[in-house]
Image: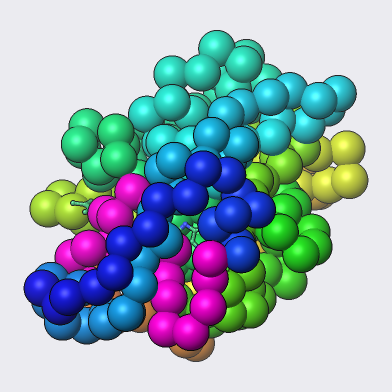
Amino acid sequence: MYNFDYQRPANAGAAAAAFAGDARYLAGGQSLVQAMKLRLSQSERLIDLGGAADLAGISVEGNTVKVGATTKHANVAASADVIKAIPALAELAGGIGDQMVRNMGTLGGSIANADPAACYPAAVLGLGATVHTNKRSIAADSYFTGMFETALQTGELITAVSFPVPTRAAYIKFKQPASRFALVGVFVAQTAAGVRVAVTGVKSSVFRATAIEAALNASFTPAAAQAVKLGTDGVNGDMHGSAEYRAAMVSVMAGRAVAAALAR
Ligand SMILES: Cc1cc2nc3c(=O)[nH]c(=O)nc-3n(C[C@H](O)[C@H](O)[C@H](O)COP(=O)(O)OP(=O)(O)OC[C@H]3O[C@@H](n4cnc5c(N)ncnc54)[C@H](O)[C@@H]3O)c2cc1C
C-alpha cells in the first residue's frame, strides 16, 4: 500500500473544501482500497466521507426517492421507503456483491467509480435519475461517459441521487459467480414518459437498449423484449462469455425483467 495522508471531515462542505492537489474521496473503500493495494491507484491524500452525516440517508420527496451519496447498499436494500416506492432499487442494492460489500459500499462510490459491470449505474440510467453534486445536478443520460468515466470534474463531490418513482420496474442480473458483478444486467422501468431499459456488464459503459425500449413501448410483454435481436457492435467478449452470448442475453434478461415488473 502506498503512504497517504488521511482526513475525515464532518460534513459535505468541509469535504469538498478539503479537496486540493492530489486528493481522492474515500467512501466504502470497496473499489478504491483494492486499487491502491494493487498499486493501480495512488493519491497523496484521502478524504474519508464517512464522517459527513449530511451525505447519508434516504428520503421520499413527492414522487422521488432521494438517496444520499454515502448511503450503504445494505441500507438501501433494507429501507422500508425504498422497498415501498421502488422495490427494484432495493432488490438491486440487496444483490450487490456479498454482505460485507453491501455493509461498506455506497451509492456515490459505485456511480463515481462507474465500473462497466456495476449494478447501480443500471438503476440510475434505467430510472432516469438525477445525480446531485456540490456544484450541479446531472441527468443520468449525460452522467456516464465511458469505461470508469463520468461527467464529474476533478474534486466534484456527489451528494445524493434522486430516483423518480416508476409505474413499475425490475432489475435482473446474470451474475459473474465469483464477484457477483453483472455479466449481463438489465434494468427495465415503465414510466409515464415511456419505457427505459438500461444494460450493464455488456459494453464499456452502461447504456440504454433503445430497440428494446421501442418494442416495450409498443407492447410491455416479455415476448416483445425477447424478440429484439441485438448486434455485437461494442459488446464485450471474454472468458466468461462471448460478445454473441452477451448480446443474446440482453434480450433474455430484459424479458425476465419485464415479467418480474409485471408480477409486482
Ligand atoms: C467482492 C466485491 C464484489 C462486488 N460486487 C458488486 C456487484 O455485484 N455489483 C456492483 O454494482 N458492485 C459490486 N462491487 C463494488 C461495490 O459496489 C463498491 O462498493 C463500489 O464499486 C464502490 O463504492 P465504495 O463506496 O466502496 O467507493 P470507494 O471504493 O470508496 O470509491 C470508489 C471511487 O469513487 C470515488 N467516490 C466515492 N464517493 C464519492 C462521492 N460521493 N463523490 C465523488 N466521488 C466519490 C472515490 O474517490 C473512488 O474513486 C463489488 C465489490 C467487491 C469488493
Compared to residue 178, the image places residue 67 above or below, namely: above
Q: State whether residue 62 appears in this view.
A: yes
Rendered location of residue 196, percent (x, y) = 71, 52
> In the displayed structure, does residue 247 sit left or right of residue 180?
right
In magenta stretch: residue 216: no
Colouring rule applied to residues: rainbow
> In the displayed structure, does residue 259 sit left or right of residue 44?
right
Q: Residue at x 59, y 54 (%)?
A: 14
| Stretch of the chain drawn in magenta | 18-35
Location of the N terminus (image quadrant)? bottom left
Count of labels in the image: 0
Q: Nearer the viewer, residue 243 or 91?
A: 91
Rendered location of residue 62, percent (x, y) = 86, 23
Q: State whether residue 257 appears in this view.
A: no
Q: Quadrant of residue 7?
A: bottom left
In magenta stretch: residue 32: yes
Q: Residue at x 89, y 45 (%)?
A: 193
Rendered location of residue 88, percent (x, y) = 54, 31
Compared to residue 133, the image places residue 246 above or below, namely: below
Q: Quadrant of residue 86?
A: top right
Q: Residue at x 55, y 12 (%)?
A: 80
Ligand 1 location (quadrant) = bottom left
Q: Nearer the viewer, residue 20 or 223?
A: 20
Rendered location of residue 174, percent (x, y) = 32, 49
